[in-house]
Image (cartoon, rainbow, N blue to C red):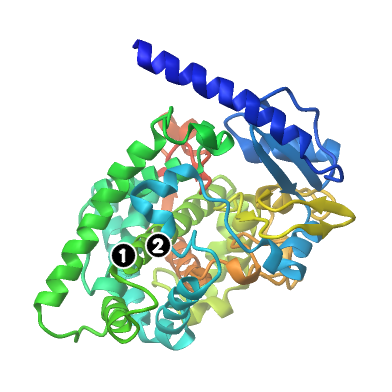
């Protein structure tokens, strides 16, 4: 380490100490309870590499509304359905901003991406494009043939592996399916070869983006270190974002060279919107929107499908029951259509139970935009808010046998995951609810049901311990740490 670097670090530490002292003097006195804090670092040492687990255990001691100090950042942790409803519904506007990780500032992404924009003119314009032209009922119905085709290609790929007695990496196969579904919806073309094990590089870039966004970064707790970027997170994110945004730029240029917009896809809609509303959003907004759609759409659906397949494969009773329902309603060996989902209650219960136990986004991030009272506590402006959806889904006060995978619990409950029932909010709730929810609830059960209905599945005994390893890799999404690789067996 050179002398200049050492001097910079020492100056930074000195400034942190001064900032910490000033911060402590002005800290609100009516915060919710929380664990004892250490000087300077506060409660940072308590996070560990699995924050959803660590904060869940702390909430058992300090309550469902808990405050921590993570470096310089006052943080509110919500761990119950009742408290989540207060934050995400009753006082949604006060909690409507996002707390933005430093890595997302790479290439000014946070200034253009709908995920991170504050609720305002730009956010509303982008949300309007999504709600009207991508995720509306009419748009989803119009593109149903595309989704059917991509699921057929997924089954064809698995059938090819079956004939070769080869395994299928469920996550990679699901990613390729959702990637091509989205790329056809947005660009009218595949980004991965549906018949080959392709799309790996794009998958890795998207995974790197979500990983860098979600992983603990010291700059997020000590903003004074922003210029130094000591962990290199923003530098790495610049490379990852640059690759994807450059590709989108080339696709946009290719479309504009055609001279007219006539593909009637999402890109056309967005480019026409820019032409008609030049004062609302620009081309950079659109490229960042495409990135958000791919990152959220591929990662969450892929993660959910892999967890669902893992749970079903390790529970033969559930597998048998699901196959019986599929055989009776659809007919053994057939590919599901979206209209079939409503006739398959047990399959729907499997998806709900997967989302309960394995919420793809464990912490919907929020930030307080104005001082607010919450259950008698005072929450100051700028407070980071972590709604621990993972903990809410496993709350033993709400769920019997909360750590067991039991799809039957939903057969008579009537609970759904569309933001109305706060015991189950894997996609969030309120104005910041995931806009891609209508697509996810169509794609995941169709892919899952088609995989179960067209094959039996074997796990190589040599890798069974990895396939059924239920540990997770923490990031913005909570992905399976060890991939699920299974061999599709032809039906008798």
Disc 1 crowd rating (10 Å Cα; few below 14, some 14-19, many 20+) is: some
Q: Is residue 95 left or right of residue 82?
A: left
Identified at 77% across, 39% down, the residue is 26
In this rendering, does residue 216 appear at all?
A: no
Locate residue 232, reporting x and y percent. 38, 31
Disc 1 element: helix
- Determine which residue is flagged by label 2: 112
Q: Is 10 or 55 nearer to us in this picture?
A: 10
Look at the numbered discs 1 and 2 and tell me whether their residues touch, using CB distance below 8 Å: yes
The numbered disc on residue 284 is: 1
Q: In this picture, is 216 found above or below 5?
A: below
Identified at 22% across, 66% down, the residue is 190
Q: In this picture, is 48 found above or below 170?
A: above
Locate residue 256, reporting x and y percent. 15, 76
Quarter of the picture holding the N terminus:
top left
Identified at 85% across, 40% down, the residue is 33
């Amino acid at each position: 380490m050179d002398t200049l670097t050492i001097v910079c670090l020492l100056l930074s530490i000195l400034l942190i100490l001064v900032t910490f002292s000033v911060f402590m003097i002005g800290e609100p006195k009516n915060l919710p309870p929380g664990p004892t804090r250490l000087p300077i670092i506060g409660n940072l040492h308590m996070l560990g590499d699995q924050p959803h687990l660590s904060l869940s255990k702390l909430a058992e001691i300090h309550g469902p509304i808990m405050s921590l100090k993570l470096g310089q950042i006052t943080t509110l942790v919500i761990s119950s359905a009742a408290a989540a409803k207060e934050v995400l519904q009753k006082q949604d506007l006060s909690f409507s901003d996002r707390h933005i990780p430093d890595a997302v500032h790479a290439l000014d992404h946070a200034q253009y991406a709908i995920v991170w924009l504050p609720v305002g003119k730009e956010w509303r314009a982008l949300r309007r494009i999504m709600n009207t032209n991508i995720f509306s009922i009419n748009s989803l119905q119009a593109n149903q043939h595309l989704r059917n085709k991509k699921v057929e290609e997924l089954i064809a790929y698995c059938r090819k592996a079956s004939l070769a007695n080869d395994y299928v990496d469920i996550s990679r196969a699901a990613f390729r399916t959702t990637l091509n579904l989205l790329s056809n919806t947005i660009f009218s073309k595949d980004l991965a070869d549906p018949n080959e094990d392709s799309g790996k590089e794009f998958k890795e870039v998207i995974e790197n983006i979500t990983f860098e966004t979600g992983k603990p970064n010291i700059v997020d707790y000590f903003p004074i270190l922003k210029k130094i970027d000591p962990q290199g997170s923003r530098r790495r994110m610049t490379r990852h974002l640059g690759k994807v945004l450059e590709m989108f730029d080339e696709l946009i240029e290719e479309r504009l060279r055609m001279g007219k917009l006539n593909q009637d896809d999402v890109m056309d809609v967005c480019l026409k919107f820019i032409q008609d509303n030049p004062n609302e959003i620009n081309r950079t907004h659109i490229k960042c929107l495409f990135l958000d759609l791919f990152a959220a759409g591929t990662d969450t659906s892929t993660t959910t499908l892999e967890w669902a397949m893992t749970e079903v494969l390790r529970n033969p009773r559930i597998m048998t029951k699901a196959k019986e329902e599929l055989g009776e309603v659809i007919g053994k060996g057939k590919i599901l259509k979206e209209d079939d989902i409503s006739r398959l209650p047990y399959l729907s219960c499997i998806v709900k139970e997967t989302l309960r136990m394995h919420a793809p986004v464990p912490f919907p991030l929020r930030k307080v935009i104005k001082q607010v009272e919450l259950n008698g506590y005072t929450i100051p402006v700028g407070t980071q808010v972590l709604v621990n959806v993972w903990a809410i889904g496993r709350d033993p006060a709400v769920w019997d046998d909360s750590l067991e995978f039991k799809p039957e619990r939903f057969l008579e409950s009537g609970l759904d995951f569309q933001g109305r029932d706060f015991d189950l909010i894997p996609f969030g709730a309120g104005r910041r609810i995931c806009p891609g929810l209508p697509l996810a609830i169509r794609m995941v059960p169709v892919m899952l049901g088609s995989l179960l209905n067209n094959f039996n599945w074997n796990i190589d005994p040599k890798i069974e311990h990895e396939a059924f390893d239920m540990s997770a890799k923490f990031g913005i999404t909570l992905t399976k740490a060890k991939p699920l690789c299974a061999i599709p067996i032809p039906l008798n």
